[in-house]
Amino acid sequence: MSPIYICYEKKYHTPKDVLQQTHQSTARMTQIVDWQTLNAYYSDHFVLPLPPGHRFPMEKYSLLRDLVSELPNLFLIEAPAASDTQLLYAHDASYLLRVTSGELSDAEQKEIGFPWSEKMVERSRRSAGATIAAAKTAMNDGISGNLAGGTHHAYRNRGGGFCVFNDAAVAARTLQKEVSSNLKVAIIDLDVHQGNGTASILQHDPSIFTLSIHGENNFPFQKEVSDLDCGLDDGCDDQTYLRALHKCLDQLDNRFRPDFIIYLAGADPHEDDRLGRLNITKVGMQLRDESIFQYSLDRNTPIAFSMAGGYGKEIESTVAIHLQTIQTALQFQLRY
């Protein structure tokens, strides 16, 4: 069966001009089989060459795509590359030039955690492009995802913590520049590590609200100031975590009421994560995802999600948490 292009109007809490503009761009970009299909963007085949023994779990992305490709009502789309123009919405021109031309210093490469290569640049563009594409798709479909992304440690003028370009900041700004200048965006970052780069880039931008729930004693050890930070103690359990999450969502409601949500669904709060230091069970992780998607659905607010971090003692446990997030998103897509 050949895929068909479908556009239809949904009533979101967004400026009136948004849906009219996104119908055209999303129709060109997104092939969907029916209105209940969840569109997700992948970039795992743009492999980043790493030396033997490198601690970044690159293979989790291909393992995840293999699993989700079997899910019904999920349509996988190759991630487009973010353009220079889009990356410059959140990054300095001098930094972008150093990245693309291979002029990052040894110290800059060490802070990022990846050796420079043309493939590193291409993968980083695709990872950011996937979140941009998911965000534009979600404006029309209600929900869409990036099977990678969540590169929240990248600052305006430098990378860090396995992050080259800040996909959430780039995507939020791209929506405002290319879809609607009046759009209010909330970035809900539930990776176990604070989104320090995101907080720094958007610190003085009242149109984008940054919310980070993270391990207080975990990396980065010098944290930035988000619009709302919630630092959790080591060993935090499901009940404590979910209570903190709902309190933060209540504050988001009281302080901002977004038109659009970008959700970083990190797998690293899970109890099996070797870097996470929290004790959130798999059930707790599912309840976390359900809370975010329910918050979005209750307010008719479109949402784009990314996988963010995950460093399980066994890579299969990380992939299982990411898979669970996508399965939960699929359940909610049926209700949009």
Image (cartoon, grey):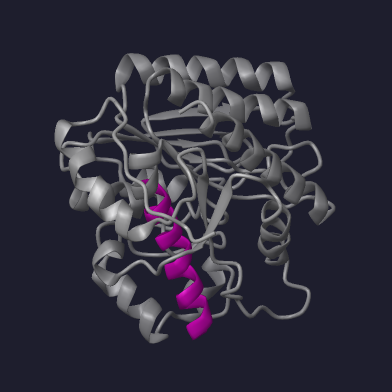
- Residue lying at 25% horizontally and 46% vertically, measured from the top left: 22
Q: Main secondary structure of the magenta part?
A: helix
- Residue lying at 45% horizontally and 23% vertically, measured from the top left: 297
In depth, the one of 222 and 24 nearer the eye is 24
Where in the figure is residue 320, as x and y percent of width and height? 76, 45
- Residue lying at 67% horizontally and 43% vertically, measured from the top left: 267
Q: On the picture, is 259 further left or further right than 239?
A: left
Q: Residue furthest right?
A: 314
On screen, 67 above or below 268?
below
Give the mark count.
0
Q: Does 148 lie within the magenta span?
A: no
- Residue lying at 29% horizontally and 26% vertically, measured from the top left: 11
Q: On the picture, is 298 further left or further right than 265?
A: left
Quarter of the image that includes the N terminus = bottom right
Q: Does 125 lie within the magenta span?
A: yes
Where in the figure is residue 27, as x and y percent of width and height? 31, 54
Quarter of the image that includes the C terminus = top left
Q: Quadrant of residue 268?
A: top right
